[in-house]
C-alpha cells in the first residue's frame, strides 16, 4: 500500500471497509503506512506532525477489528525507526504490522531490520502455532457421559474385549499398570 493516495483518509476508509467484509478469524496487515502512530515514540526530527485524519481512520479500524501493533506492544518505550532522511535529518516508524489481538500470543517475533538500497528498514513478523509442551497432563471425567447408556455399554464392552485380549498374556500385569507384588488395589 504505497502511493500518494495514502495521505487521503478515504483511501484507508475504502481499504478498511473492504477488509471488514472478510469472514476470517485472524487479520494480519502490514506495510508502509506513510504515517506515524505516535509522534513522541515514532518520530525524531522534522515537523512534529503526522497525517491525523488518516491516523483517525487507522485507529478506528484497529479498535473495530481488535487489532494491535505487534512490534509496539512489547516495546512500549523504545524508539526504533523504519524510514530515514539525512537532509534534514528525520527518522520515523512508518512501517508496521497490525494483527488480530487474539493472534498476538502466536507472534514469536516482530522486528525491525536494516534495509538494503532503500530508505526504509525491513519489518518482520514470525508467527507460530501453539507449541505447549505436553506434560503428564490432567484428566477430568466428563460426567455427562455417565448418563449416556450407549456410551456406558460401549465402555463396558471395550473393557471386556481388552481384558480378554490380555487374559493369556504373561505380561498382563505390566500392560494393565499393576504391580503384582504390591498390595491388592495398588498401582504403579
Image (tube, rainbow, N blue to C red):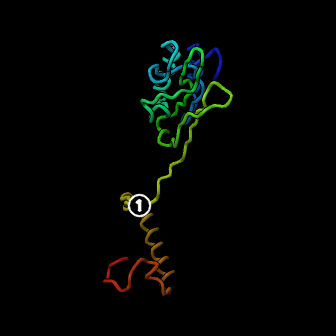
Does 133 appear above or below 178?
Answer: above
How packed is label 1: few (under 14 Cα within 10 Å), some, or many (20 or more)? few
Which residue is the extreme one toward the left?
183
Which residue is located at x 44 percent, y 20 percent? 40
* Residue 179 in sight from this viewpoint: yes
Viewer-nearest residue: 15 or 115 = 115
Query: Could you say where residue 163 lies in the image, as x and y percent from the top left?
Result: 46, 79
Residue 95 position within the rendered picture, expressed as x and y whole percent measured from the top left? 57, 26
Q: Quadrant of residue 118?
A: top right
| Residue positioned 54% across, 36% down in the render | 111
| Quarter of the picture holding the N terminus | top right
Please determine whether, in this image, residue 170 is positioned above or below residue 109.
below
State the residue at coordinates (64%, 21%).
2
Q: Quadrant of residue 151?
A: bottom left
Q: How many marks?
A: 1
Q: Is residue 154 left or right of residue 84?
A: left
Q: Position of residue 88 (x, y in %)?
A: 57, 14
Residue holding disc 1: 137
Question: What x and y, as percent, mark residue 61?
Answer: 50, 23
> In the rendered image, is residue 147 in sight?
no
Q: Residue at x 36, y 59 (%)?
A: 143
Amino acid at each position: 500500500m504505497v502511493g500518494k493516495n495514502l495521505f487521503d483518509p478515504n483511501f484507508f476508509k475504502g481499504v478498511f471497509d473492504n477488509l471488514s467484509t472478510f469472514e476470517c478469524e485472524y487479520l494480519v496487515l502490514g506495510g508502509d503506512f506513510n504515517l506515524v502512530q505516535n509522534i513522541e515514540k515514532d518520530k525524531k526530527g522534522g515537523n512534529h506532525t503526522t497525517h491525523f485524519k488518516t491516523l483517525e481512520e487507522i485507529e478506528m479500524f484497529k479498535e473495530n477489528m481488535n487489532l494491535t501493533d505487534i512490534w509496539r506492544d512489547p516495546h512500549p518505550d523504545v524508539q526504533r525507526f523504519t524510514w530515514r532522511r539525512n537532509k534534514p535529518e528525520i527518522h520515523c516508524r512508518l512501517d508496521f504490522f497490525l494483527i488480530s489481538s487474539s493472534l498476538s500470543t502466536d507472534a514469536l517475533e516482530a522486528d525491525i531490520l536494516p534495509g538494503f538500497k532503500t530508505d526504509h528498514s525491513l519489518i518482520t513478523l514470525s508467527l507460530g502455532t501453539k507449541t505447549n509442551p505436553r506434560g503428564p497432563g490432567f484428566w477430568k471425567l466428563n460426567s455427562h457421559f455417565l448418563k449416556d447408556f450407549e456410551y456406558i455399554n460401549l465402555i463396558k464392552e471395550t473393557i471386556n474385549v481388552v481384558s480378554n485380549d490380555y487374559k493369556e498374556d504373561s505380561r498382563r500385569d505390566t500392560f494393565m499398570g499393576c504391580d503384582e507384588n504390591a498390595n491388592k488395589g495398588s498401582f504403579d
